[in-house]
Amino acid sequence: MRKEVNRRSFVARKMVAVFLMVMSLTIWGTSETVWAHPGRTDANGGHTCRTNCEKWGLQYGEYHYHNGGGARNNDVPASNNANQNTPRQPATVSQPVVPKSSDTSLKSVTVNDEAVGVADEMYYTTFDERVNVVAEVNNGKASYEIKNKSLTIGENTIGIVVKAEDGSTREYNLIVKREKLSDNTNLEVVVQGKTVEFSNGEARVELDAETEELDYEYHPEDEKAKVRVDGSPKLEVGDNLMKFVVTAQDGTEKVYTLTLHKQAKQGDGTMGTVLGAGVAGCAVYGVYKRSAKKPKK
């Protein structure tokens, strides 16, 4: 009886062992069917299928996990699989940002080709109606604008606006004083070393018969006035006419007429008197000696 019980117990244990072995083989075999295929896994316990993918129930290029690593393949959305399979882009190295310049300084300013000292306020004097202003900035990335205009008599302000690279601005003021053009036509005429006195723009000088060459010179009171001399310095017996045409800076014109009377040779001739007691047009003498003595002929 005891032998029968032992035999049945042995058979039961054997059947349990066989059952457990069969179950183990079944589970192991099923797992291998789904997951066991060639290829190394990454640090996350998965990899991308490249070989016999259909055999393992996968698509070519599909990323999946092995041995419980990460989430199961069927639980990973397709978009995540695609992202997992996308190669990483190289990191972008950011360049240091260089700040834009705020330099609004001027290097030089010229007015009508004349250098003017750079300052917040610069000054220049002219008689012209317009001036040519040229500026130069210190920073090559800065720009400038000149607010030029026609000049009126007196002070005029011309703005020079410098714009830096960063957009900041600075305005310099060029103050141009336009002086009134002179209408001064006064003239001093000297003949034979004596000043001629004009009355209403006319004068007469008596010369003796021995005078062969006329020694004369003229001086405009305003250095900016122009003088033109009409008439020959060669003296003939009798009246010799000379005209001095003075043109002032503003265009005003005045004519000085000088009659030179040369006496005929008879006895001892001397220098005659200078006619014309008026001093009109010759209020000031010797202020500016622009014209040297006229060359003798």
Image (cartoon, grey):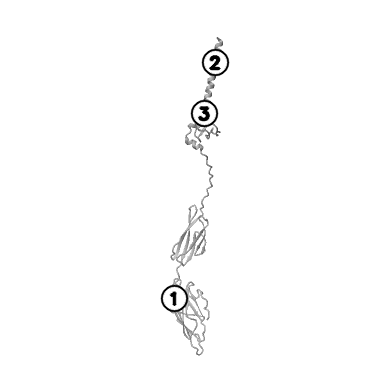
Category of crowding for the residue at label 2, using alpha-carbon neighbours closer than 10 angstroms: few (below 14), some (14–19), many (at least 20) = few
Residue 114 drawn at (x, y percent): 51, 64
Instruction: Give, as a three-letter code, the residue at label 3.
Output: Thr
Q: Which quadrant holds the N terminus?
A: top right
Element carrying mark 1: strand
Given this view, does label 1 or label 3 mark the residue nearer the observer? 3
Residue 3 seen by the camera: yes
Circle 1 residue: 254
Is 262 placed above or below 170 here? Answer: below
C-alpha gap between disc 1 and disc 2: 155 Å
C-alpha gap between disc 1 and disc 3: 125 Å
Question: Which residue occupies 44% across, 76% down?
Answer: 254
Category of crowding for the residue at label 1, using alpha-carbon neighbours closer than 10 angstroms: few (below 14), some (14–19), many (at least 20) = some
Picture disc at residue 270: none
Category of crowding for the residue at label 3, using alpha-carbon neighbours closer than 10 angstroms: few (below 14), some (14–19), many (at least 20) = few
Do tag 3 and tag 2 residues touch (Cβ < 8 Å)? Answer: no
Of label 1 and label 2, which has the lower sequence position? 2
Residue 280 seen by the camera: no
Question: Which residue occupies 53% across, 22% down?
Answer: 22
Element carrying mark 2: helix
Residue 12 drawn at (x, y percent): 53, 16
Picture disc at residue 11: 2
Element carrying mark 3: helix
Q: Considering depth in this image, is 110 or 199 the residue closer to the camera?
A: 110
Instruction: Give, as a three-letter code, the residue at label 1.
Output: Lys
Circle 3 residue: 33
Question: Which residue occupies 54% across, 15% down?
Answer: 11
Is 51 placed above or below 187 here? Answer: above
Of label 1 and label 3, which has the lower sequence position? 3
Q: Considering depth in this image, is 242 or 34 the residue closer to the camera?
A: 34
Given this view, does label 1 or label 2 mark the residue nearer the observer? 2
